[in-house]
Image: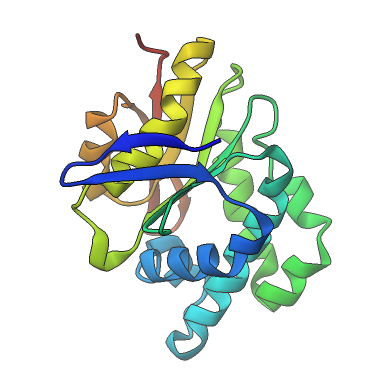
């Protein structure tokens, strides 16, 4: 079902991504995350980084797809991938996936260590978990991020459930705060790499 959402400058539609959206979703997220600190840490080879980031998001898309909680704006200007209550653990699932070794190679233990540290700080109270959110770089600042996030948050609020996220960029904290999230703590997952964890109580 499509839900109409108002953006800052126009109107757009938000819908649930389907398997046929996979390639476009992964490419969008790779462009949005190409300078994200975690991924530059895990993929230091700049020449190969974009291709590996696309494959990385392909893995996340595949493990999230059964939950039906990957939201996209109608022309794929923005994407938000969520995991429902009780399904936030990824480290053990990732460790069992042969695709992780193929993607990270000798860096796989480093990637799993980073993920495990994030999960150690993860709240245990039932909540929706925003794993990833990205906006097409040339479309940023036009309200698409807000539209794709609020689409899911309205449903989460109606169910009376909290939401949680992590971000390695201090510059995005204020954006998430404007959507009702508050800062919880800082988690150092690798030397020089810190995540800001955020929590949103149900509203409305």
Residue at x 70% of width, y 56% of height: 62
Q: Where is residue 96 in the image (x, y as percent from the top left)?
A: 84, 56
* Left or right for 179, reference 14: left
Q: Which residue is painted at 61% across and 21% down in the image?
A: 124
Q: In which quarter of the image is the C terminus?
A: top left
Q: Quadrant of residue 192?
A: bottom left
Q: Is 4 located above or below residue 80 in the figure? A: above
Q: Is residue 22 left or right of residue 162?
A: right
Lateral position of residue 19 relative to residue 145, left or right: right
204 shown above or below 166: above
The spot of residue 100 in percent (x, y) is 73, 66
Q: In which quarter of the image is residue 4?
A: top left
Q: Nearer the viewer, residue 97 or 119?
A: 97
Task: Tell me how the rendering is colored.
Answer: rainbow
**Which residue is at a point 59% across and 39% down the rendered structure image?**
69
Can residue 197 be seen in the rendering of this structure?
no
Decide which of 69, 85 is in the foreground and name it.
69
């Amino acid at each position: 079902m499509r839900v109409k959402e108002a953006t800052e400058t126009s109107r757009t539609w938000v819908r649930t991504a389907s398997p046929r959206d996979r390639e476009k979703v992964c490419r969008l997220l790779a462009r949005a995350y190409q300078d994200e600190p975690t991924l530059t840490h895990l993929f230091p080879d700049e020449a190969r980084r974009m291709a590996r980031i696309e494959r990385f998001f392909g893995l996340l898309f595949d493990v999230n797809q059964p939950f039906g909680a990957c939201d996209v704006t109608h022309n794929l200007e923005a994407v938000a991938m969520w995991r429902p209550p009780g399904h936030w653990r990824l480290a053990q699932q990732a460790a069992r996936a042969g695709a992780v070794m193929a993607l990270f190679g000798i860096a796989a233990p480093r990637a799993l260590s980073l993920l495990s540290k994030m999960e150690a700080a993860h709240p245990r109270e039932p909540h929706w978990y925003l794993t990833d959110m990205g906006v097409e770089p040339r479309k940023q600042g036009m309200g698409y991020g807000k539209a794709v996030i609020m689409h899911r948050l309205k449903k989460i609020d109606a169910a009376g459930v909290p939401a949680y996220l992590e971000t390695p960029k201090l510059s995005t904290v204020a954006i998430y705060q404007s959507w009702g999230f508050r800062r919880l703590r800082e988690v150092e997952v690798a030397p020089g790499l810190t995540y800001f964890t955020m929590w949103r109580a149900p509203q409305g």
